[in-house]
Image: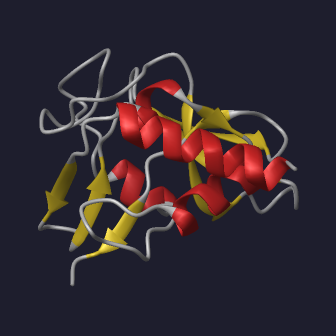
Amino acid sequence: MQKIALLLLTSYSLLLAQPSIVKDERQKILWEDTQHSQETKLNHAQAVQYCQELVLGAYKNWRLPTLQELLGIVDYTRYKPAILKEFEHVTTDSIYWSQTPYVRSSDEFWGVNFKDGASSNASINYDRYVRCVRDIP
């Protein structure tokens, strides 16, 4: 039931979203930049599943970014949002999930808050924002 609800939410969100992809030549990845990445919070397992099922710009094979990849799009010269100007859809009230585990706890992962570019850990049960990536083909 939860998987069906997530699939419906994903489909509905992407129908409303204006699909946008930001190409990151430096890190050799593509970034999701849709309204979904600004408006929808998911727990860590749902975030992983969302990225795995995402089809955007005819691309598949999306995944959660690593902590280093997320930090790679922080712009510390900016505030609210502290993210590169190429990104249109961003929220500054919570962190974005990464796939990088927090070594002191098996049920926590790192994330980045684009309010100021700070990184922090969070329990897998918390709802956080998601911005998927994929390697440049």
Question: Can you give x and y, in whole percent of width and height, for residue 101 in the image?
Answer: 70, 62
Question: Can you give x and y, in whole percent of width and height, for residue 77 in the image?
Answer: 17, 26
63 shown above or below 61? above
Q: In this view, does 121 lie to the left or right of 50?
A: right
- Residue under the image location 56 percent in, 55 percent down: 98
**Residue sitting at the far bottom:** 137
Marker count (numbered): 0
- Residue under the image location 30 percent in, 21 percent down: 81
Residue closer to the observer: 136 or 9: 9
Q: Is residue 104 left or right of residue 81?
A: right
99 shown above or below 74? below
Q: Is residue 31 left or right of residue 12?
A: left
Residue 60 visible in image: yes
The image's colour scheme reads secondary structure
- Residue under the image location 32 percent in, 15 percent down: 80
Q: Is residue 14 left or right of residue 3?
A: left
28 shown above or below 16? below
Residue 109 visible in image: no
Question: Can you give x and y, in whole percent of width and height, for residue 123 in the image?
Answer: 82, 42
Quadrant housing the C terminus: bottom left
